């Protein structure tokens, strides 16, 4: 199992992504607490 934090900032801080977590268990992906900028956060993760 792998846990990736996609954002750790509060929703009122424009310099941080809102909180969300990606849980990977084998080939299964679970996404929790999705913030308003999820697509940008996922794109940043894949780009690095």
Image (cartoon, helix red, strand yellow):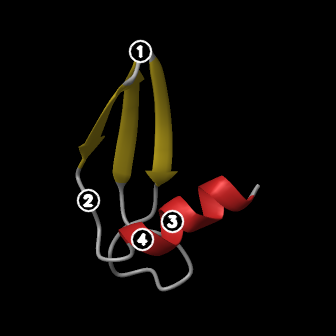
- The residues tagged by marks 4 and 1 sit, at their Cα atoms, a distance apart of 22 Å
Asked if disc 2 and disc 4 are in contact, CB closer than 8 Å, the reply is no
Instruction: Say whether marks 2 and 3 touch (CB < 8 Å).
Output: no
Q: Please state, as top left, top right, bottom left or bottom right, where the C terminus lies in the image.
A: bottom right
For marks 2 and 3, the one nearer the N-term is 2
Q: Earlier in the sequence, mark 4 or mark 1?
A: 1
Q: CA distance from mark 2 to mark 4?
A: 10 Å
Above or below, 19 against 30 in this view is: below
The numbered disc on residue 14 is none
Q: Of the two numbered discs 3 and 1 on the same chain, state the one appearing first in sequence.
A: 1
Q: Residues within 10 Å of mark 2 (few under 14, many from 20)?
A: some
SS at mark 1 in the image = loop
Q: CA distance from mark 2 to mark 3?
A: 10 Å
Q: Is residue 10 above or below residue 33?
A: below
Residue located 42% across and 71% down the image: 39
Disc 1 target residue: 26
Residue beneath label 2, please? 34
Query: x and y percent of residue 30 in the render?
Result: 27, 35
Q: Nearer the viewer, mark 4 or mark 1?
A: 1
Q: Answer whether labels 4 and 3 touch (C-beta < 8 Å).
A: yes
Q: Which residue is mark 4?
A: 39
- Residue at 23% x, 52% y is 33
Q: Is residue 19 left or right of residue 5?
A: left
Q: Residues within 10 Å of mark 1 (few under 14, many from 20)?
A: few
Mark 3 lies on residue: 41
Q: Report the quarter where the N terminus lies.
A: top left
């Amino acid at each position: 199992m792998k846990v990736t934090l996609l954002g750790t900032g509060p929703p009122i801080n424009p310099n941080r992504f809102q909180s969300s977590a990606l849980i990977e268990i084998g080939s299964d992906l679970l996404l929790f607490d999705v913030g308003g900028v999820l697509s940008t956060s996922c794109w940043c993760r894949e780009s690095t």
